[in-house]
Image (cartoon, rainbow, N blue to C red):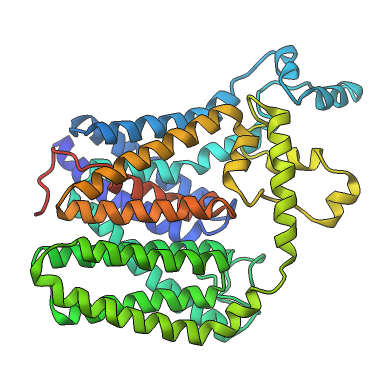
Amino acid sequence: MQQFNTARVLPVAAAGTLLLALLLGGAAGGPGDFAVELSALFTLAVALRALPSTLLTPAARGGIILAGAALALPLLQLIPLPTVVASALPGRAGLANELASVDAAGLSHASLASTFTERSLWALLPGIALFAAGLALPPVWRQRLLATVVTFSLASVILGLAQIAGGPGSPLRFYEFTNTSDAVGFFANRNHFASLLYVALVLGVSLLAVHWRRGTSRPLHGALGATVVVFYLAGLGLARSRMGLLLGMLAMAGAAAILISSSSSTGRAARRWTLVTATIGVLAVVQISLYGILNRLQADPLDDARWTFFANTRALAAHYAPVGSGLGTFVSAYQSGQTPQQQQSFYANHAHNDYLELALEAGWPAIGWMVAFALWWLWCTVAAWRRASSSALLARGASLGLGLLMLHAMVDYALRTEAMLAVAGLLCAVLAPPSPHHKHPA
C-alpha cells in the first residue's frame, strides 16, 4: 500500500516542483524561491522513499554520489568551529582583526557569512529533488516532465512577445530588475530566459525523435517539429542574448545530429521535412532579428567589466583557498578585495563565470566536484551515443542540454536560478542510463 501511494504521489510532486520552479524561480534569490524550496523538500522526501526499491545503474549511483557531495559542500561550511580555528583559515585574518577591534563576536564557521551559505543549501534542493525524482520515476513520467519543460517554454515565448509589445513598462515583466527592452519570459534576465529556450529546443526535437523511432510519425509531426524549432529561435532573437543565440545555433546542430541518429525508416520523411523547414525558419528568424542582434554586438559596458571580474575572482579564489569564502558570499568576498572607488564604479553581484565563482566560494572541494561532474557527464554521454533505444535519444538530448548549460556557465550564471537548476537536475536523471527496474519503451 505504501509503495502504491508513493507511486501516485511522486509524479504529481515532481511535476508540481518543476512547474513552481519555472514559474517562480526565475531570479537568483527571488521572492518565489521559498515556495519552490518547500515543494522541492517534499518531492525529495518522497523520492528518497522510492529510490531504495529502484535498481540503479552505476552511472545513476555516480550521479547520486555527486548530488550528495553537492549538498555536503555547504553543510561542511556550516559546521561550528572554535573561533581560533575559523580565524586561522586562509583569508580570514583581516576580518577577524576588524571584528576583534569592535568587540564583535568572532568567526565561528568556515563560511564568512553562514546565513548566505544556508540560503545556498536551500537553493540546491530543486535540482537535487528533480534528479532524485527522475531516477525513481518510470520512463514514461520522465518523458512527461521533459514535455512539461517544452510546453512551458513555448508559453514563455508567447509571454516574451507580449512583453515586447507592452514595452519597458509592461506589467508582464515580473521582476523589478530586468532587461526592459528584451523578452525575458518568467525570468529576470534575458540570458537565463535564453538558456531555457535552447535547452527546450533540444528536448522538443528529442521527444519527436522518440515518436519517429516508434513508428508513430506523420508528415504533420515534421511540420510541427520545424514550427517549434523556429518558435524557440524567434524567442532567442527577442531575448537578444548573444551567448544564447550562439548556443541556440549549437543546439540546432546537435538537434540535427539527434534526428539523423534516430534510425527508424518510418521517420525518414518527417526528419527530412523538419531539417529543411527548420533551416528555412532559421534564415527567416535571423533576418527578422538581425537589427536587434547587431545592436547587441555593439560595445557593452559589461564586456570589459567581465574580464575584470574574472581576474579579480581568480585572485580572490587563490586568496581564500583551499576552503573558499563560503557558498553565497561572493558579493562580500569580492567587495573585500576592492577599494571604495572600485565598489562605486561597478557593482559585482556575480563573477559571470560560475566555475570561478564556485572556486572562490567553495575552494578546492568545489573544483574537485566540478571535475568529477564533467567526467560523469562525459561518461554518460558516451554511453548514450553507444546505445540504440528511445531512452538513448532522450539521453542524447539531455546530454546536449547539459553541455550547453556548462558552456553558458563560462560567461553567466543561469544555474544560480532555481528554475534552470531544476531543469538541469531533471536532465541529469534522464542522462543517467535507465534503471532496469522499469520496463522501457522500445
Examine the image and state in which quarter residue 230 appears. Answer: bottom left
| Residue 224 visible | yes
Q: Quadrant of the N terminus?
A: top left
Q: Look at 25% across and 55% down and name the residue there.
A: 394
Give how far across and how far down residue 140 sits, in percent: 18, 54
Q: Quadrant of the C terminus?
A: bottom left
Examine the image and state in which quarter residue 180 appears. Answer: bottom right
Give how far across and how far down residue 361 sits, in percent: 63, 35
Position of 399 relative to 200 (above/below): above
In the picture provided, is 311 more to the left or to the right than 257?
right
Q: Look at 57% across and 57% down and name the residue there.
A: 27
Q: How many tags in the picture? A: 0
Q: Look at 74% across and 22% down and name the residue there.
A: 107
Give how far across and how far down residue 373 sits, in percent: 42, 37
Give how far across and how far down residue 321 sits, in percent: 67, 27
Q: Look at 31% across and 46% down and name the residue there.
A: 381
Question: Which of these two is toward me, 257 or 242?
Answer: 257
In the picture provided, is 331 more to the left or to the right than 222?
right
| Residue 197 visible | no
Position of 239 relative to 356 (above/below): below
